[in-house]
């Protein structure tokens, strides 16, 4: 390395070209390290926000899916209850009709003949 050049007016030694290159290279390294660190922090913060957003969206989706499943189960149970009620009512009416026929067989046959004749007239038109 060459010796420092002394300015005759200043009496202060000036850094050599090599020293100035080394100083500037060191400054570039520091600036690059700071830029990388700053970028890394920003990327980490952005990744954290994305992760939190995804977790929140996943939680909301799961919650909606649970509510949907619960509602479907509730509607299925209501449908089964309505079917069972309707079947019980039909069984009751059928049993009442059987009892009526047993108690009044002649009237039952007369009603059946009349209903058949009326239905035949309606369907002929």
Image: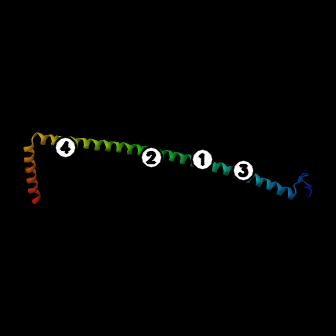
> Mark 1 and 3 residues: CB-CB less than 8 Å, in contact?
no
Q: Percent from the top left, x then y, of residue 25?
A: 79, 56
Q: Between disc 2 and disc 3, whose residue precedes?
A: 3
Say which residue label 4 marks. Answer: 94
Q: In which quarter of the image is residue 104?
A: top left
Say which residue label 1 marks. Answer: 48
Q: In which quarter of the image is residue 69?
A: top left
For image coordinates 38% across by 43% down, the residue present is 73
- What is the secondary structure assignment of the residue under circle 1? helix
Q: In which quarter of the image is the C terminus?
A: bottom left
Q: Percent from the top left, x then y, of residue 26?
A: 80, 53
Residue 65: image tag: 2
Q: Percent from the top left, x then y, of residue 6?
A: 91, 55
Inter-mark Cα distance, 1 to 4: 68 Å
Q: Nearer the viewer, residue 66 or 10?
A: 66
Which circle, 2 or 1, is nearer the viewer?
A: 2
Q: Could you tell whether 30 is left or right of 66 in the image?
A: right
> Mark 2 and 4 residues: CB-CB less than 8 Å, in contact?
no
Residue 34: image tag: 3
């Amino acid at each position: 390395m060459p010796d420092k050049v002394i300015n005759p007016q200043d009496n202060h030694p000036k850094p050599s070209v090599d020293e100035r290159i080394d100083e500037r290279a060191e400054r570039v390294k520091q600036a690059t390290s700071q830029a990388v660190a700053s970028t890394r922090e920003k990327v980490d913060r952005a990744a954290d926000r994305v992760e939190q957003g995804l977790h929140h969206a996943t939680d909301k989706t799961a919650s909606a899916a649970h509510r949907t499943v619960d509602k479907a189960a509730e509607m299925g149970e209501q449908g089964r209850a309505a079917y069972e009620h309707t079947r019980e009512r039909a069984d009751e009416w059928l049993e009442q009709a059987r009892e009526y026929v047993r108690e009044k067989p002649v009237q039952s046959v007369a009603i059946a003949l009349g209903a058949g004749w009326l239905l035949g007239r309606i369907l002929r038109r």
